[in-house]
Amino acid sequence: MVKKERKQKESVMIKIKSMSGNVLYEDKKATTIKQAVENAVDSDANLSSADLRYADLSYAEGLNKKLCTPLCILEEQIGKIRAYKLVNKNYEGPYQGGIVYKVGETHSVKDANTDDTIQCAKGINLATLSWCITEWKKGYHILIAEFTQKDIACIPIASDGKFRVHKCKIIGEKDLKELNLK
């Protein structure tokens, strides 16, 4: 005999977690991630390590980019800044291609996307070394790029480690053996 079980309407718990999986904030009232982030901001939750890669935060109100985007530190730097560029076996960006990056060359994109609600868009996308190592695949290379604060096109809100520049110079290549990738 099959019994029909009465299903109770369950409330959904939205959890905002850090990159390492720790729960930073829980919300039973929010129906969207955007609402949960807004509620977290209203409650002064520390979202500085939040993994919001797939959250659509367009038009989120009360969101303080400085609380959830550690890469904003780049906006305060003076002089030359270094970051990393992940490239495929042909030394092109692995996702958008087009530019072949070579050590010693300066590259620029005239109309890099400056919208900080978009994680990955037109421009030269640079990243932290940890992002490059995480996304690295066999045959890829990790280049060292140099730029200045005025070259920054956009640091996306709650970036997972990527940002865009208008211009940079490739000054070297990381030794993959040193990074335990070979």
Image (cartoon, helix red, strand yellow):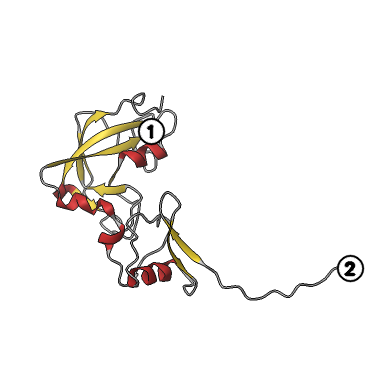
* Residue 98 appears in view: no
As helix, strand or loop, the secondary structure at mark 1 comes to loop
Residue that label 2 marks? 1
Circle 1 residues within 10 Å: few <14, some 14–19, many ≥20: some
Say which residue appears at 32% left-offset and 47% top-offset: 162
> What kind of residue is marked 1?
Asn
Quarter assignment of residue 139: top left
- Say which of 13 and 162 sits in front: 13
Residue that label 1 marks? 88
> Horizontal and vertical percent for residue 182?
41, 24
> What kind of residue is marked 2?
Met
- Say which of 164 and 51 sits in front: 51
Left or right: residue 88 compared with residue 115: right
Tell me the quadrant of the picture where the N terminus can be found.
bottom right
> Horizontal and vertical percent for residue 161?
33, 47
Say which residue appears at 25% left-offset and 56% top-offset: 114
Mark 2 vs mark 1: in front: 2
Left or right: residue 95 compared with residue 2: left
As helix, strand or loop, the secondary structure at mark 2 comes to loop
Quarter assignment of residue 167: top left
Residue furthest to the right in view is 1
Precedes in sequence: disc 2 or disc 1: 2
> Horizontal and vertical percent for residue 30?
46, 73
Q: Is residue 34 above or below residue 76?
A: below
Say which residue appears at 30% left-offset and 42% top-offset: 128
Report the Cα–Cα distance between label 2 and label 1: 59 Å
Circle 2 residues within 10 Å: few <14, some 14–19, many ≥20: few
* Residue 131 appears in view: yes
> Horizontal and vertical percent for residue 75?
18, 52
